[in-house]
Image (spheres, rainbow, N blue to C red):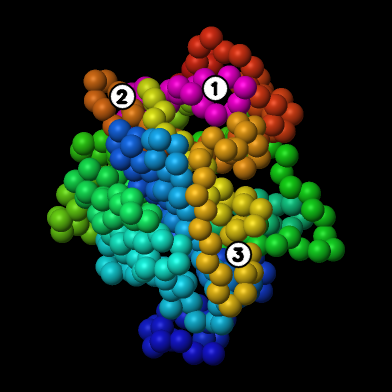
Amino acid sequence: MLTKFDDFPLHQTSAPLAYLATSERNAYGRYWFNGFDPEGEFYFGIAFGVYPHREVMDCALSIVRKDGTQDTFRASRHLTGDRTDMRVGPLTLAIEDPMRRLRITILPNDTGITADLIFHARGPVHEEPMDIMRQGVRTVMEVSRYTQFGMWEGFISVGDRRQDIDPAQIYGTRDRSWGWRWIGEREAGISQAMPQQLFWLWAPIHWPQKCTHFGVMESAQGIPSKKFTQVFPAWPISSDFDPLDSSGISPGQDAQHRLKFHAGSRLADTSEIDLTIDGRVKTLVCEPLLTFPMMAIGYFHDDWGHGFYKGELAINAEHTRIDDLPPLSPLRQHVQQVIRVTCDGEVGHGVLEQLIVGPHERYGLQGFLDPAPQQGSVAVRPPSRDVT
């Protein structure tokens, strides 16, 4: 099967581009975006996924507001092989200028949710360390990903409620990932065991003249399997910069975290992140303003999970409140919080993403979803280490 991109010298096998180099059923490619008001008035998330061996292309857009309301648009279609047509019902993802400007539109439809949003990059793309996870001897996740900071313009409308998006004020982050991972309906005839412990924190933060980037995946004993921190340059969205020029990205030498949890939950309340940059420790104090459940755009969703086959075309809308789910519901453990961040008198704005299930000794977490113990202060600092 040929597609129009077979006219470009992009092939990595002898087959046309429609045919993947792997037969892995869970092969995928995904675009993910967030956008948020710096004072926490609203947050929106977008996911767009392509699953060639499941013959699915799906997408979701969800907005949550300070008043607790959440409105979500979802769509899924049968993918016949040509992955270059990135339309799913009324939603289209257009790459108008690769790694500089991407556009998401939702045309008028029966859900009453429409949008026209443009992501403008304000810095370079950054390739993260590869994610690899095994279940027994099988590699169930092998993923490449890059991240980019940006600003948004446009609007989201839900019925007669319109949210205008000002590119001078509304921050955002995006990532692009591909490879394979757990998606879609579970396979029959194999072990259904899932990881019983995950501790993931991610904090992309915008500052007036830069962006900082932190992420960590830890075991129950607090041993990181993945940890990174960087400082990104940040430029005006109208400036002529090369998004592939990574020379201005400064890697950090270390990062540590201290979390205090809301009573009766595993949701971080206040938090501190220590970033060691150029041998100096900078403490970021994070104040949560608004919480967004990632389930809304497909993560661990029971019915509209990523890659679920819905037939030729299916469209869905959901109107909920973010407190509809109990604090310890499994569907409420993967969240992003809009945060206001202070460091040395400077104020930044970003998100803190967390997915914390199972035990974690340092924070006193037990069981799969036992609530965090009562805390009077942020968890103690781990022992200091020399930075080399």
Q: Where is residue 95 in the image (x, y as percent from the top left)?
A: 33, 69
Q: Position of residue 372 (x, y in %)?
A: 63, 22
Give the Cα separation between the discs numbered 3 and 1.
33 Å
Q: Which numbered dot is residue 262?
A: 1
At label 3, the amino acid type is Gly
Q: Give the range drawn in magenta.
A: 258-284
Most prominent secondary structure in the magenta stretch? strand
- Which residue is the site of mark 3? 307
Q: Where is residue 259 in the image (x, y as percent from the top left)?
A: 51, 23
Residue at (81% x, 64% y) in the render? 188
In the image, is residue 298 above or below residue 371? below
- Which residue is the site of mark 2? 342
Q: Is mark 2 on a helix, strand or loop?
A: strand
Q: Position of residue 243 (x, y in %)?
A: 27, 58
Q: Are marks 3 and 1 in contact (CB under 8 Å)?
A: no
In which quadrant will I find the N terminus?
A: bottom right
Does residue 111 appear left or right of residue 372 in this picture? left
Q: Which numbered dot is residue 221?
A: none
